[in-house]
Amino acid sequence: MALAGAAHPRTAVWGYEGSVPGPALRFRQGERLRIELENLLPADTTVHFHGIRLPNAMDGVPDLTQPPIAARGGKFVYEFALPDAGTYWYHPHLGSPEQVGRGLYGALVVEEVAAPVVDRDLVWVFGDWRLDREARIVADFGNFMDASHAGRIGNTVTVNGAVRETFEVRAGERLRLRLVNAANARIFGLDFHGHDPLVIALDGHPVEPHRPEGGRVVLGPAMRADLLLDAAGEPGRAYPVVDDFYHQRAYRLLDLRYAKEALRGGRAGAGSPKIAANTMPDPDVGSAQRHRIVFGGGMMGNMPMTGMMGGGGTTRGMPMMGMMRGAAWTVNGAPIPEHDHHPILTLGLGRSYVLELVNDTEWHHPIHLHGHAFRVTSRNGSATRYREWLDTVLLAPRERAEIAFVADNPGDWMFHCHVLEHQASGMMAVIRVA
Ligand code: C2O
Ligand code: CU
C-alpha cells in the first residue's frame, strides 16, 4: 500500500482482502451478516465485530468464544443478525497489537431504516503506523516501553489507508462523516477549522445532536463518532482539520478543500435530524446492583515493578519485565494474563448494573465491554449531560466514570482497555452474564 504517499516506498501490510482498511461492509438494520473468513496470514487470527450486540459464539475472542482460526488456510464463518444501526468496525482479537498494527481492520456500517438525509455518507477510518525511513512497519510490537506507557503510538496517521493532503468538498453540501479510530493507541482530538460539526451518534448509537465539547471531537482507540458536517466554507478555499489531542504535537490531518463550484440544492443548514434509538433496554439505575472496577499500573503508577508475578516468576536471571510478557497493568489489583478467562464478575441475565470504573493511573484508557452497549451516567461524580450509549468509554488519567446497562446478552464477555498494548499486558478481564 502507498500509505505514506507517492514520494515514499510502498508499505507491506496485512489487510482484509489485501487492503487497508478492509472492505467497508454496509448492511441495513435488521439484516444478517454472513462472512466466511479464510486466514491466509502466517499467524492464527479471529475477527471481532466491535460494538455489535451479537451472540457470544460469534464474538471472535480466541479460546473464549471460538478456537483460533489457523494460519495459512484456516476458515471460520461469522453469521449473526444486526439489531442496531450505526458505525461499527471489525478487527482481529488475537495478537491484536501486531495484527491491527499491520493493518487488519475495517468499517462496518449498519444503515438506519430511516437515515437522516445528507448529500454524502462517508467513513473515515483512522490508522496510525510506526514506519521507518523506507516506509516499512517497525516490528517492535509488544515491547515493554509501549506497553507500560501510552501504547504503540506511531508516526504516520492515515485516513482510509493513506496520508491525505486534502479531502474535496463542495460548498452547500451536508456530509455524514463516520469517524472510526482503528489505531492501536493514538487518541485523536479533531478541530475542523471554519466548521461546526454536529455529533449525532457515538459508538454507533444516536445521541442528542450536539456540538463537541470545546469544539474538538475526541476519539480514543476503537471509538466512533458520526458527525453532520455542513460545508459552510467558501468555494475555492481550503480549511485545515487539525488533530491537537497531544499538546505540543498538533498536526494538520488534512485540508477540507472546496471545489470552485458550490453544490446546488445541497442540504447544508437543514434542521438537525432525529435518528431512532437503537434496541438496548434502558437500565433501571435505581434498582441496579453496583460494582467498582479499578484499573491500575503503568509507569509512574502505583504498581510495584517487582512482584508482578505474584511471586515465583523470576528464574534463571530472566529480567522481571520479560516474564509475563511484561505485565504492566492491573484490573482490581491483579494483572490478568491474556489467556486467563476466569470472570471477575458474574452478572444476572436481564438485570441492571452500574459499574463504577476507576482509572487509578496517569494514563488514558478506552475501556471496552463486549456484547453490550452501556450508558455513561456520570464522570468524576457529576451526571453526564447526554447519558450517551457507548461500547468504549475513554477514561482520562485518574478519572472515574459510571456506566449503566442491562446485562441482556448471555455469555463470557471481554472487558478491556482498547490500547492494544495495555490489553495485552494485563488490562483486561472477562465479565460473565448468566
Ligand atoms: Cu475492539 Cu475486545 O475489542
Ligand atoms: Cu489502557
Image (cartoon, rainbow, N blue to C red):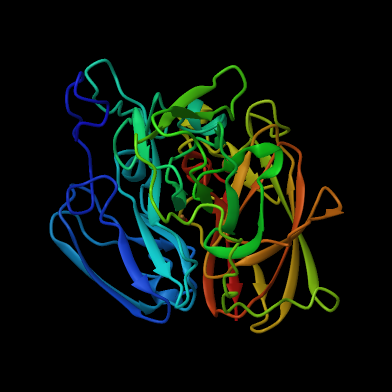
Query: Does 212 sit above or below residue 77?
Result: above
Q: For residue 156, what is the image quadrant?
A: top left
Question: Residue 246: horizontal and vertical position, in percent?
Answer: 59, 26
Left or right of 376 in this view: 121: left
Left or right of 238 in this view: 293: right
Q: Residue at x 69, y 34 (%)?
A: 303
Image quarter hosting the C terminus: bottom right
**Considering depth in this image, is 428 or 207 the residue closer to the camera?**
207
Query: Does 318 sit above or below residue 73?
Result: above
Q: Residue at x 50, y 33 (%)?
A: 151
**Considering depth in this image, is 408 or 3 the residue closer to the camera?**
3
Is residue 310 something one can see in this rendering?
A: no
Q: For residue 99, what is the image quadrant?
A: top left
Question: Residue 130: horizontal and vertical position, in percent?
Answer: 36, 27
Image quarter hosting the N terminus: top left
Query: Does 177 sit above or below residue 288?
Result: above
Question: Residue 190: horizontal and vertical position, in percent?
Answer: 55, 36
Question: Residue 30: horizontal and vertical position, in percent?
Answer: 42, 82
Q: Residue at x 51, y 46 (%)?
A: 423
**Considering depth in this image, is 231 or 42 the residue closer to the camera?**
231
- Furthest-bottom residue in view? 350
Query: Does 25 sit above or below residue 231?
Result: below
- Quadrant for ligand 2? top right
**Considering depth in this image, is 239 or 102 the residue closer to the camera?**
239
Q: Residue at x 62, y 22 (%)?
A: 247
Is residue 10 something one can see in this rendering?
A: yes
Left or right of 85 in this view: 105: left
